[in-house]
Image (spheres, rainbow, N blue to C red):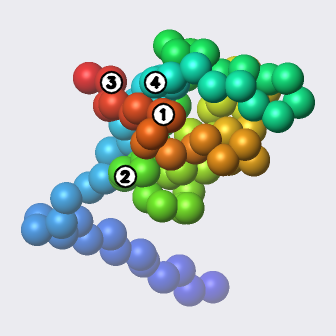
Amino acid sequence: MAVSAIRFVKSSNKKQKNMALFKATITRTQGLQGGQIIEKGMSVQFSYFGIPWDGNGPGTQAINDAFLRVYGIDLKAHQVLNPGYVEVVEVR
């Protein structure tokens, strides 16, 4: 049986993306459908590769998933998953 060798080459001109820790915080109190309320100061932490505010992509979904996990609130379904309601900062 022949064994093939796999060679891993590290490119020196490409930056490796590192996973970052982010904190998302509600910036204003808002009543939602079904009697739910988001209050200013509610916050969650989540990790993600890249930029969390990426339109309707996986970064934005990571923010929504964090609020679902911690508070049980689906910000996207209530149309408050945007920079007007949620501030995201990288934790250093």
Kindly report the distance in space between the C-alpha atoms of the residues bearing marks 3 and 2.
13 Å
Q: Earlier in the sequence, mark 3 or mark 1?
A: 1
Mark 3 — residue? 91
Q: Residue furthest right?
A: 34
Viewer-proximal residue among 30 and 74: 30
Question: For residue 69, which quarter of the picture?
Answer: top right
Mark 1 — residue? 86
Viewer-proximal residue among 61 and 30: 30
Of the numbered discs in the image, which one, if any, rests on residue 27? Answer: 4
- Where 58 sits versus 91, above or below? below
Mark 2 — residue? 50
Q: Amino acid at mark 1?
A: Val
Viewer-nearest of discs 1 and 2 = 1
Kindly report the distance in space between the C-alpha atoms of the residues bearing marks 4 and 2.
22 Å
Q: Amino acid at mark 3?
A: Val
At label 3, counting other C-alpha atoms closer than 10 Å, the crowd grade (few under 14, some 14-19, many 20 or more) is: few
Q: Earlier in the sequence, mark 3 or mark 2?
A: 2
For the residues bearing labels 4 and 1, Cβ distance under 8 angstroms:
yes
